[in-house]
Image (spheres, rainbow, N blue to C red):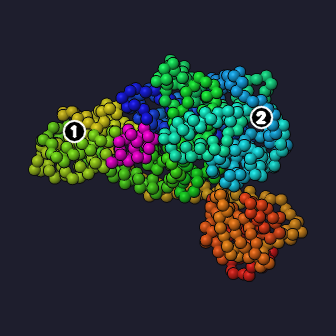
Amino acid sequence: MPNAQQKKRFTITSALPYANGPLHIGHLAGAYIPADIFARFQRLKNHDVLHVCGSDEHGAAITIKAKKEGKEPQEIVDQYHSQIMESFQKFGIGFDIYHRTSAQIHHELSQEFFLTLYNKGEFIEKESEQFYDEKYKQFLADRYIVGTCPNCHHDGAYGDQCEKCGTSLNPTDLINPTSTLSGEKPVLKITKHWYLPLDKYQTFLEEWLLKGKKDILKSNVYGQCNSWLNSGLQARSMTRDLDWGVDVPLKEAKGKKLYVWLDAPIGYISASKQWALDNNKDWEKYWKIQNDPKNNAHLIHFIGKDNIVFHCIIFPAILKAHGDYILPENIPANEFLNLEGDKLSTSRNHAVWLHEYLEEFPGKEDELRYVLTSILPETSDSEFTWKDFQARVNNELVAIFGNFINRVMVLSHKYFDGVVCKGSALTDSDKQVLNELASYPSKIEKAINSYRFREALSYFMQAARLGNKYLADEEPWKLIKTDEERVKTVLNISLQIASNLAIFARPFLPFTAKKLFEMLNQAAKGWDQGGRGDLLPVGHQLGETQLLFEKITDEEVEFQLKKLAQAAASNQQANSEALAGKPAVTFDTFSAMDIRSGEIVAAEKVAKTKKLLRLTVDTGLDRRTIVSGIAEHFKAEDLIGQQVSVLLNLEPRNIKGVESQGMILMAEDSQGKLFFVAPSEKVLPGSIIR
């Protein structure tokens, strides 16, 4: 934790979003709102802060999008880079620079990094077999390959990572790999690439990360890193066979590009270089090791859980291999945010898109910031629902914070023409309120510096509750008839609380803080002034009263829920249309399948797996074992007596050490929910399904 008494230099990064689609609330809750709160707070503490981000415009995700839309990759990145940057600006994410990895300065720096490592002999040059799509005549980058994850058996894992369990993969690890270009099984073909031997840095990473940061890293980050390192690091290719990206700067590597996870994090540094050029600054102070280690910047990476391995292991290994750069002090990654009981999904349009929110809720940027901060998935997944959004805005921002500010402003103008008055001597209750108010700056500071933003926000709201309760308890609207001097005191203290709330709001609700300072007719105050009871001097003239927040209506919520329902229906229809196109089979082929009714008589989890259940099924002919990947959808104990349809003559297969002797037929809806395909009425096991 930084020393509060000494000015520090912070280099804060937010994960570079892929420029292949718009931003949604899951992105905001993962890497952007937490980073913005942290950066704003450190600036309020008068620290030297550089907060950088930019569009990740390389990698397979971009080219996949381009192929789907029949466009060139440059068209895709230009479109979404502009949209993403504009959304961040409107939403109030205060980057010092939002850059892009297609910029020349980034290409040059990435190539410089590669050559430095190459000239130091850090790479291993070797030929290997990699997947190749014979139909498209090209090698397949990691994201062009999907298959079954060998760790959790999720069917949609990519060639570099399973986004369900977070395991980092190589394409050859996948079970039943498929090319996303042709939909066909790729073949292995020889190609040459340059590998970074991560195993060389195994000991260093264990010492620096697992031992050195055991008490610093969040539990979810430490756990994933520990698991990966315990599995043993292997050499990872730093180049790819692609037609889009940063050229490998070697004559013998013509047509090859840098691996996106070498190129992308260097985007933080190239963005810093561009910022320095634009502002006549020295970027090296924020990134390079200084002669006096005390002058090194504090490098903090804000990311989502799917980027943990790359920022905690691969990028630090690259920086260590280079030798001139500081390593991250912390990587406070967040887990995933779900939406209305389901995972956020860009492909299914199950998302709250930031650019749409900004259009549909103009002027309500801070309302979304507040709600997302209050439910940040800091150590486990969390969920956003529109009803909860409405409740938090209406019952907390409007009814507590907004109500307090409105009442104290209205009463001050009504009774004393908007002038701050002195009043009578302080009572014990006044002193108690002011003492409690003085405790909040340190509480909020400690929570933010520990990356506990939900807790920090809760202290802010407690301070608002303090003001609201104080005003309600003192009832100045009644006292004005009998004790005007006491009313002056009550409103003075209430206005001091309001001024403090404007300070406390600055990291969390920047638009609201600015508006409140304007209402108080006061210049914005720094964090060191928070907690004081004399921020507004006697005789100070207040500004005009405005409403800080407005309620979210039932109609607005229903509109958003209807949008999600329409997206789900559209997606379900699209899936149905896609499934209708399977090629015809002969009647003889269909007749060869022996499908019969069965009944589950026993069920248990398969050890060391998340998805698999070992089922004993009465088929009418025998009782056989069938392994089924439905454990995440059904509890074993609930399945006894369940009628099922069974494909009996499927060739037996060994799954996790258990021989599976058939297949249970299931239906899956557009949301991924499974249903048993079974007779509508009770039938005897063994009944033939025709």
Q: Residue furthest left?
A: 482
Mark 1, other Cα within 10 Å: few <14 / some 14–19 / many ≥20 = many
Q: Position of residue 516 (x, y in %)?
A: 33, 39
Residue 469 in sight:
yes
Mark sitting on residue 1: none
Residue 414 in sight:
no
Comparing 419 with 436, the one in front is 436
Locate the N terminus by quadrant.
top left
Confirm whether the magenta stretch covers residue 140: no
Q: In this figure, which residue is indicated by the disc labeled 1?
A: 418
Total tally of numbered discs in the picture = 2
Of helix, strand and loop, which mostly describes the magenta segment? helix
Q: Which residues are magenta?
A: 443-462
- Is 182 left or right of 606, judged from the image as shown? right
Image point (67%, 62%), residue name = 606
- Is 555 left or right of 461, judged from the image as shown? right
Image point (75%, 34%), residue name = 240
Image point (49%, 39%), residue name = 216
Picture quadrant where residue 55 is located? top right
- First in residue order: circle 2 vs circle 1: 2
Comparing 208 with 421, the one in front is 208
Q: Position of residue 570 (x, y in %)?
A: 64, 57
- Is 252 left or right of 627, judged from the image as shown? right
Mark 2, other Cα within 10 Å: few <14 / some 14–19 / many ≥20 = many
Q: Position of residue 182 (x, y in %)?
A: 80, 47
Comparing 638 with 667, the one in front is 638
Kindly indicate whether the residue at mark 1 contacts the one at mark 2 (C-beta within 8 angstroms). Answer: no
CA–CA distance in space, label 2 to label 1: 69 Å
Q: In this figure, which residue is indicated by the disc labeled 2?
A: 241
Image point (65%, 64%), residue name = 605
Find numbered disc 2 in the image and state the secondary structure of the residue it sits on: strand
Q: Amino acid at mark 2?
A: Asp
